Image: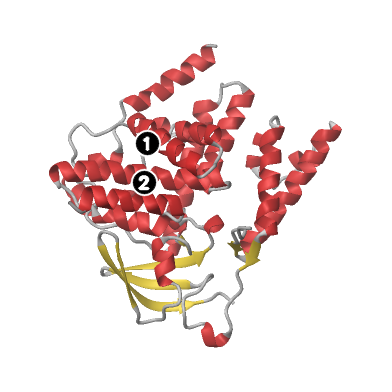
Amino acid sequence: MTQEKKFYLTKEGLEKIKKEYKDLKNLKLSKTKGEIPKIWHSEDLNPEYLAFQEDLSFLELRITELEHIFKNSELIEPPPKEKKNAVNLGARVLVDVNGQTDEFEIVGTLEANPSIGRISNESPVGRALLGHRAGDEIVVSSPIKTIYRIKKIRYLS
Amino acid sequence: MKNILNFLIEVGKLKKIPRKGWVLRGIKNPETIAAHTFRLAFMAWLLGKQMKLNVNKILKMCLIHDICEVYAGDTTPYHPLLPKSQKEWKKTTQKWPRFSKKEKEKFFHEKYGKENKALKKLIFKLPPVIKKEIKNLWSDYEKGLTSEGRFVRQVDRVENLLQALEYWQKEKKFAIEPWWIQIEELVDRPLLIEFLEVLEKKFHRK
């Protein structure tokens, strides 16, 4: 039997998904009862949910996907004190890349979005940074040689 | 029917709008937004099928992923750094742009807001079911809500890399480094990483 893929999530990411799951379950329940879901009157309604208003199949697909994520999720926790000097999931890493400074947060694939500085632990750069410490130089060279020099590592809690 | 026709006329404009990234680099007669969408759809179909993803959803997502650019324009990652003088543009694109986390978040939300507004305007008069489907697919693509959304977001960049490599191979007029740097920080699906190795062999190891 093949091992199910693990989904690493930050606390914030897990809470977001939990809220979405709860909302969508309520939405489905209301729809199957033929009621107008209360959630649509809510002021903090996620506008994306409106897209599910008329298409139940989208709603069901998303609920199934969220259940699969829950079943295989693992919370990203800050490492013990003695391991905080190395890059792990959840780390904020200040790097010098070919003379330019950048800051990455290492997250799981579900929360990765380099446009806002969140790098997947499964991307070539994310993978290469894991386990390294401040002062280390990592070379990613496929096919262009890029040097990432780790300047600082921190964890939020 | 009139509203569907009007929508088609508007998205048809993408057949004539050149991609900004090539304009910045001074590429003559660069590909249009519609041309990029065309090959992205093929790439996502062929690779998505191998990953057992929902190809129907993927193809629709590819079709709509850039339609907001009819009104919002094509915003590149270099946008916040662009000098007024067009002569300086090429120089700005020599290096992959780096920003602080706060700046990245600010630019991301500004772009999202601008494009969301443009999309709403574009699909406003479409039948409600289609309008909602397009909005849903676009949000999925932009935010990577599902496996298909995250996949298309990555394939979009890989298609862009392929086009860059084709222009680069022809004239070597610009630096190819920024594309590879962006890709290595973004792509994380094993099949796409395997595809990148094929691209590398084809264009770099001859």
Q: Position of residue B172 (x, y in %)?
A: 15, 47
Q: Secondary structure at mark 2?
A: helix
Q: Amino acid at mark 1?
A: Gly
Decide: few, some or many residues near mark 2? Use Cα within 10 Å; few <14, some 14-19, many ≥20: many
Q: Residue at x 69, y 31 (%)?
A: A55
Residue at which label 2 appears = B158
- Residue B109 appears left or right of A32: left
Q: Chain of mark 2?
A: B
The nearer-to-camera label among 1 and 2 is 2
Q: Position of residue A156 (x, y in %)?
A: 56, 74
Q: Compare residues B137 and A8 and report the one nearer the observer.
A: A8
User: Where's the N terminus of chain B, which quadrant?
Assistant: top right
Q: Secondary structure at mark 1?
A: loop
Residue A64's place in the image compared with A115, above or below, is above
Residue A151's place in the image compared with A51, above or below, is below
Does label 1 or label 2 sit earlier along the sequence? 1
Residue at which label 1 appears = B73
- Residue A29 appears left or right of B68: right
Q: Residue at x 54, y 41 (%)?
A: B53
Q: How is the image coloured?
A: secondary structure
Q: Amino acid at mark 2?
A: Val
Q: Chain of mark 1?
A: B
Q: Residue at x 47, y 83 (%)?
A: A85
Residue A144's place in the image compared with B46, above or below, is below
**Residue B72 visible in rendering:** no
For the residues labelled 1 and 2, the Cα–Cα distance comes to 21 Å
- Residue A137 appears left or right of B57: left
